Each structure stands twice: as structure tokens, then as C-alpha cells.
Amino acid sequence: MGSIMMMYLHGGDWNKIREALLNIGAPTNAKRLGVNDDEVVRALTYAHEIKPERYTILGDNGLSHEAAENLARITKVI
């Protein structure tokens, strides 16, 4: 799921990744992964704190709750 959402943020073909994962039976949404929507959003808002010395597409401050929820909905993760 993370690859799908990060590809969206990079402006790439996130649907292609999603389709490839679906083709091999990998989970592409929260339900299939066994987590709830709030856990996905919370993970996105705190991910930037895991390795703060490493810059990622999530930036120094991470995503706001609203941005994380929108990202997950757009990419069909929740």
C-alpha cells in the first residue's frame, strides 16, 4: 500500500503498481491488509518520524491528517 501511495505523491503511475499487486494477490487496501482506515492515516502522519535524518517525499513535517486521508482515499487504500 505504501508503494501505491508514494508513487501517487511522486506523480507516477500508481495504478500500474496497484494492478501489479492485485495480480499477485498482494493486499492493496487497509481491509485486505487487516488494518483499519484510522491506522493507515495515523501511519502516514507519523511515518516521517521513523528515520528523521532521512528525507522522503513526506517531507520534514509529514502529512496532515487531512492530506493523509485524501491520499489514502484517492489511491483506494481506504
Image (tube, rainbow, N blue to C red):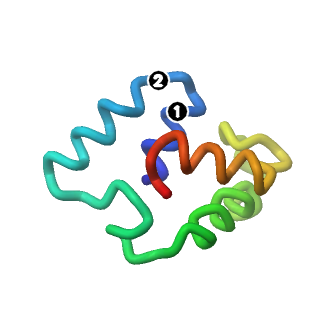
Q: With respect to residue 11, does 35 lie above or below?
A: below
Q: Position of residue 27 (x, y in %)?
A: 30, 60
How far separated are the C-alphas under marks 1 and 2?
Answer: 6 Å
Q: In the orientation shown, which residue stands out farthest toward the right?
A: 61
Q: Please tell me which residue is depicted at 66% across the width and 53% down the height of the picture.
A: 69
Q: Amino acid at mark 1?
A: Tyr
- Name the residue carrying label 1: 8
Q: Position of residue 17 (x, y in %)?
A: 32, 37
Q: With respect to residue 3, does 45 lie above or below?
A: below
Check disc 1: other Cα within 10 Å, few if <14, some if 14-19, many if 20+: some
Q: Amino acid at mark 2?
A: Gly
The answer to whether 72 appears left or right of 29 in the picture is right
For mark 1, give the secondary structure: helix
Q: Nearer the viewer, residue 63 or 31?
A: 31
Q: Quadrant of residue 6?
A: top right
Q: Nearer the viewer, residue 45 or 72?
A: 72
Q: Position of residue 73 (x, y in %)?
A: 55, 48
For mark 2, give the secondary structure: loop
- Name the residue carrying label 2: 12
Q: Please tell me which residue is depicted at 43% across the width and 42% down the height of the picture.
A: 4
Q: Please tell me which residue is depicted at 57% across the width and 64% down the height of the picture.
A: 40
Please report contact status of discs 1 and 2: CB closer than 8 Å, yes or no: yes
Q: With respect to residue 32, does 18 lie above or below?
A: above
Q: Position of residue 3 (x, y in %)?
A: 44, 45
